[in-house]
Amino acid sequence: MAFTLAQARPLLTNPELALFDASRAQPIKTLTLAKLRSKVTRARALRDKYRDLYRRQTVGAKTGPSAKRPATGEDNARTQRKADIFAEVLGRFEERLQKLQSGSNTAHAAAA
């Protein structure tokens, strides 16, 4: 499922939202190879951060003081959605990076 700006805005901080916005169709086309690599690194770090936080929260909810009550399924929904958003953003950046790299490899091969 592709997240929209309206879905991402209430979940993300301003710097995270700027990264999300840079991964959209038009802005991603203006990124240079170096900037794109930087965005891939940042998106991967945020995806890993929220994915790991979700896992820690899930384990904490099962073993913590609230373990006696049944899980509602909404406890970590926000963190999981943020991890999903950054997984999607990372995928878009990596896809664009691969296209740029294959295009530059083709240009080098043609020049040789």
Image: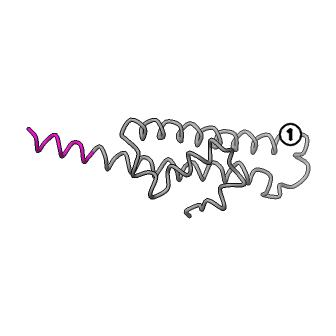
Report if residue 106 lies within the magenta region: yes
Q: Amino acid at mark 1?
A: Gly
Q: Which x, y percent locates residue 48?
A: 59, 39
Callout 1: helix, strand or loop? loop
- Residue 9, by quadrant, is bottom right
| 71 sits left or right of 40 in the view | right
Foreground of the two, 16 or 49: 16
Q: Which x, y percent locates residue 80?
A: 68, 51
| 57 sits left or right of 38 in the view | right
| 40 sits left or right of 66 in the view | left
| Image quadrant containing the N terminus | bottom right
Number of other residues with Cα within 10 Å of mark 1, as a class: few under 14, some 14 to 19, many 20 or more: few
Q: Which x, y percent locates residue 47?
A: 58, 43
Identify the residue under disc 1.
64
**What is the tally of numbered marks visible in this picture?**
1
Q: Which residue is depicted at the point 46% across and 52% down?
A: 27
Q: Which x, y percent locates residue 68?
A: 91, 48
Q: How is the image coloured?
A: one colour
Q: Residue furthest left?
A: 112
Q: Tell me which secondary structure the magenta stretch mostly adopts.
A: helix
Q: Which residues are magenta?
A: 102-112
Report if residue 14 lies within the magenta region: no
Q: Which residue is depicted at the point 60% across and 52% down?
A: 84
| Image quadrant containing the C terminus | top left
Q: Which residue is depicted at the point 86% across and 39% down?
A: 64
